[in-house]
Amino acid sequence: MSDSKIRILVIADYLGRRNINPVRPEAAQLVGAQASGEVDITVMCSPESILVDYYRKLGLRVIPHKIRRKVSPQSIRFIRKLVGEQGFQILHLFNSRAISNGVLAAIGLPVKVLVYRGQPGSLRRYDPVSYLNCLNPRIDRIICVSEAVKTYLEKQMWWGTDKLVTVYKGHDLAWYQQPPADLSALHLPAGAFKVAMVANLRAHKGLHVLIAATHYLPDVAPIHILLVGPKPDDQSVLEAIGKAAHPERIHVLGYRDDAPEVAAASDIIVLPTTKREGLARAVVEAMAYGRPAVISNSGGNAELVADGESGFVVPVNDPQALADGIAKLWANPEMRARFGAAARQRIRDIFNVEQGTEKTLQVYRELAGR
């Protein structure tokens, strides 16, 4: 490795999904940083990660190593050895296991520690476990995926709030060029207005809010809801659907490798999250396909969607407001087209790879004293 470059060891144990865009935006930003010529990046990740070939093809060195525990003495020793022998100046840690093991490995070593935080919530200043994560004082800088995440962390930290910086994930519209998914197997009626919700459907994703909202939608509107993520035989999901105004208009598609293409085949996307939203990737992907969104004002959502321009941002846990947003877009095709075009442009202007790469590089420079 060249001494003139900033030497960085990235630890990311993310495995990934094989859809039209298996590349996480963070990975694209690492590749962009490497291409700048200012840094020399090595990635330590699970050999099972779908990103291994991607990294290698685009010039990043990969060290296969799977971290198996929250605190793994084996991994801690391995990381310390890498830092000591190869002289890395920065440890860039991307997920929970990477952070807990990386910060412990860095103790006593002349290396800067940079971590990524993708959501608000789950950290508490009075919880000792939180100090194995982003509240650990050994951390030198924290990249937050949104201002909402940054604000949340500021409230949990006793000191060091100057460590926090917001860097939006960078997307490339070139990733979103595939044709819309074929939904013919659903046998939707002609003129059906398709509303996609793409989520793992944990409780805080707000399926119950969407179900409640169906009772406020115009009864004459042929609105059909496509749920991407939950299993079609999930009893809790089926019970929730049974409470909808028109259960027959809700379709559970299950896990889909082509989730962004399903969003592209829909008219709009919704995400009524109730808490802990960082910057919803499913919404970004739909917006990149030119689909307006109706989302709750939770976490980073309000930063992602410009209310009244590229979609509607409604209050958390407000089924009436959610239904009103959906109904407005159903009733006004011209508005829908305008909002969709604005959504796509917003991804290009604000949430692009270039800004993410440059801001990440700036953090690297500061940590390295450049």
Image (cartoon, helix red, strand yellow):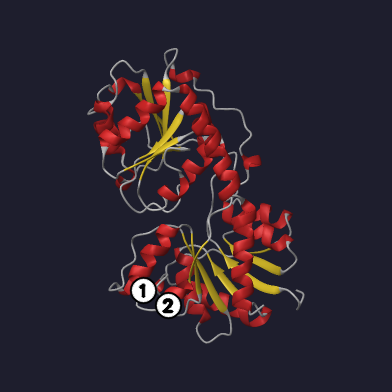
Residue occupying image coordinates x 73% and y 55%? 58
Q: Disc 2 and disc 1: Cα gap in Å? A: 7 Å
Vertical relation: 369 (above or below) 49: below
Q: Residue beneath label 1, please?
A: 157
Q: In which quarter of the image is residue 40?
A: bottom right
The N terminus sits in image quarter: bottom right
**Amino acid type shown at disc 1:** Met
Mark 2, residues whose alpha carbon is within 10 Å: few (<14), some, or many (≥20)? few
Residue 6: in sight, yes or no? yes
Is residue 129 placed above or below 60 in the rendered structure?
A: below
How crowded is the residue under tag 1: few (<14 C-alpha within 10 Å), some, or many (20+)?
some
Q: Give the residue furthest to the bottom.
A: 108
Against 105, residue 210 (above or below) is above
Question: Which residue appears farthest toward the left when viewing the image?
Answer: 243
Q: Is residue 262 left or right of residue 90?
A: left
Question: Circle 1 sits in a helix, a strand or a loop, which is it?
Answer: loop
Q: Could one spot residue 82 in this view of the protein?
A: no
| Residue 110, placed above or below residue 196 | below
Q: Mark 2 points at which residue?
A: 160
Residue nearest the observer in this picture, 266 or 336: 336
Q: Do the residues labelled 2 and 1 touch (CB within 8 Å)?
A: yes
**Which of these two is toward me, 299 or 180?**
299
Give residue 218's position: percent from left, percent from top.
Answer: 29, 21
Residue in the picture at 46% in, 80% down? 138
Q: Residue at x 56, y 69 (%)?
A: 92
- Circle number at residue 33: none
Classify residue 51 as left or right of residue 252: right
Percent from the top left, x then y, of residue 290? 54, 33
**Kind of residue at badge 2:** Gly
Please state, as top left, top right, bottom left or bottom right, where the C terminus lies in the image: bottom right
User: Could you tell me residue 337's position as x and y percent?
Assistant: 52, 27
- Front position in the image: 290 or 246: 290
